[in-house]
Amino acid sequence: MEYQKPPKGNIIQHLKQNILDSHNGLRLMLRESSTVRRIYPMMIIGWIILGIAFKFIVLEHLILAALFILDFVTETVNSAIEEACDSVEENRKNYNEFVKRSKDIASAAVYITHLCFIAAIVFFTISQAAGFEWWAKLIPA
């Protein structure tokens, strides 16, 4: 799909183009991202199994959902940065160290959000197994 710039001053056309571009980007992520195809199904299955086995409360599921969405957003930004860097790299004959650093830094954001999701699942699982009501500590007596 080729980008078409809407005419100036037409807010409806701008909104329509933004929605189409966002939908196209989401479709690309779901179809082409190896993380979305390989890692996210494992994250969701683990979340479901542990959530059922250890009876996660609604708050824990909401926290995990927020972390999962944050992870997807960082993966999307990382993919966009990698695509841009790859297109710059294709136009140059020598490898650019700046491109490698940019891709590594963007990848670090995804790594951190993966770790946060895993840490939350481990914490919720251990606290439920131990009978520790961590959420009760949030409300002052």
Image: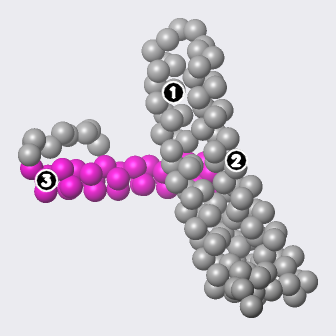
Q: Amino acid at mark 3?
A: Ile
Using the rendered view, name the quadrant where residue 133 is placed: bottom right
Of circles 1 and 2, the one toward us is 2
Residue 60, image x, y percentages:
68, 78
Residue 61, image x, y percentages:
64, 78
Q: For the point 18% across and 39% down, which residue is it?
A: 5
Provide the residue span drawn in magenta: 10-38
Report which residue position mark 1 lands on.
85
Q: Residues within 10 Å of mark 2 (few under 14, many from 20)?
A: some
Q: Amino acid at mark 1?
A: Cys
The kind of secondary structure element at disc 2 is helix
Report which residue position mark 2 lands on.
111
Task: Check the picture and name the quadrant holding the C terminus.
Answer: bottom right
**Outermost residue, top direction?**
93
Report which residue position mark 3 lands on.
11
Q: For the point 28% across and 56% down, which residue is it?
A: 19
